[in-house]
Amino acid sequence: TMSQPTSASPLDSPTDTVAGSSDVSRSSFSAAGRPWGIDEAIVAVCRQGSPGTLRKIALVGAPPWQKRLLLAYCSVQMVTSLTLFLPIFTHGSYSPPSCDAPREEWPAPDRATIAYDYALCCGSEWLLDAVTTVFFAGCVVGGCTGGFLNDRFGRLPVIVVGIVLNSVGTCFAAMAPSVYVYGALRFVLGAVAVSLLQSNFIIAAEWLTAAWGAPLSAFGFCCAAAGELVLVPLVYAADLVSPTDWRCATMMAGVLGLTALVASSIAMAETPRWLHARGESAAACQALAVCARYNGDDATAHALMVRGLRDPVGEKCGDKDDKAHLV
């Protein structure tokens, strides 16, 4: 028989909302030393923050762990936008004064585009539209496979690999020798971009309570818009370096994308929901305890390691080694 705790827990007053359920009192988290449910544990360590959507979008009152996670989430949204919207500047159409003139005599446009570089004119204009079409075909593939990859390998590995593929693929696209190689790379980039966006949203959502649902979506769109704005000075800088070469801007966008790799590696961690669903409740409990300690809530971190999480396979975290560093 489990004994009742003799002192009040620091979790005994505030309430928060668990996804798919009514308000859950934090006093239930410390009841009778029983293992916690994953939703209860996330509510305990991931506080709701300031009320109001606009305040949440501005990250006002966000716990320190969640704030740094959301900043990394924002960086991934921004660099993915570079891949999605760079064609606004590099996919402009081109029409030479005369299609009968030799290729060498065609005047260069004010801003070079793939249409000029690959001669997508004089009856080959459809290839320019085809490049855009194959990119969105890749987005469909990424949308269909992204969920499977997230569930199979985890949210964080998909994000890390996605950022690398996005940046490397963009750099390779800048060196593509023909429109067909370029189109194939854009197909891959479309698939990678959608899978990356899926993983990025999921990892942020699973580290937050349900109260952050709408603000998280709005915050993500704001970050994507900021990424589009970054394109303007980026393309301007590329024009200063090489005003007649679209490849310079594309290469710069690919290199800039690697900044999100640093942010995600430092500020992101695999979600306890995914770990728990895989039967790794010890790892899930450890991740939640790290989050709680980072947020300055050592009492919750200790309670997590002592009580553990309910798990379908009966695993309970909080062995002697786990508890030792909390004493």
Image (tube, grey):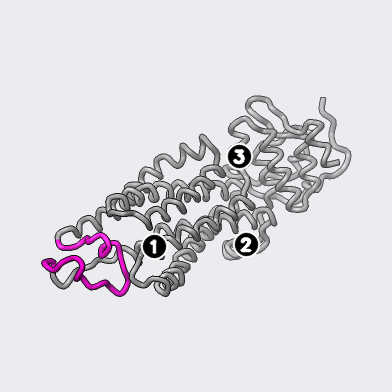
Write the start and end of the magenta stretch as one range: 99-122
In the picture, the disc for residue 181 is: none
Q: Which residue is mark 1?
A: 86
Q: Nearer the viewer, mark 3 or mark 1?
A: 1
Residue 220, image x and y in percent? Answer: 51, 58
Q: Which residue is mark 3?
A: 273
Which amino acid type is shown beneath numbered disc 3?
A: Arg
User: For the residues marked 3 and 2, what is the alpha-carbon distance in whole angstroms?
Assistant: 23 Å
Q: Is residue 169 left or right of residue 209?
A: left
Residue 291, image x and y in percent? Answer: 70, 48
Q: Look at the numbered disc 3 and give the secondary structure of its residue.
A: helix
Residue 145, image x and y in percent? Answer: 42, 39
Which amino acid type is shown beneath numbered disc 2?
A: Leu
Residue 16, image x and y in percent? Answer: 67, 50
Return the disc, 3 or 1, that comes first in the chain's sequence: 1
Q: Look at the numbered disc 2 and give the secondary structure of its residue.
A: loop
**Label 3: how many residues lie within 10 Å, few (<14), some (14-19) or many (20+)?**
many
Nearest to the observer: residue 17 or residue 207: 207
Quarter of the picture holding the N terminus: top right
Q: Are the residues at dot 3 and dot 2 in contact (C-beta closer than 8 Å)?
A: no
Dividing the picture into quarters, in which one does residue 312 lie? top right
Nearest to the observer: residue 217 or residue 34: 217
Q: Which residue is mark 2?
A: 59
Quarter of the picture holding the C terminus: top right
Residue lying farthest left? 100
Please tell me whether residue 228 belongs to the stretch shown in magenta.
no
Q: Main secondary structure of the magenta part?
A: loop
Please tell me whether residue 118 belongs to the stretch shown in magenta.
yes
User: How many marks on residues?
Assistant: 3
Q: Nearer the viewer, mark 2 or mark 1?
A: 1
Q: Is residue 80 left or right of residue 87?
A: right
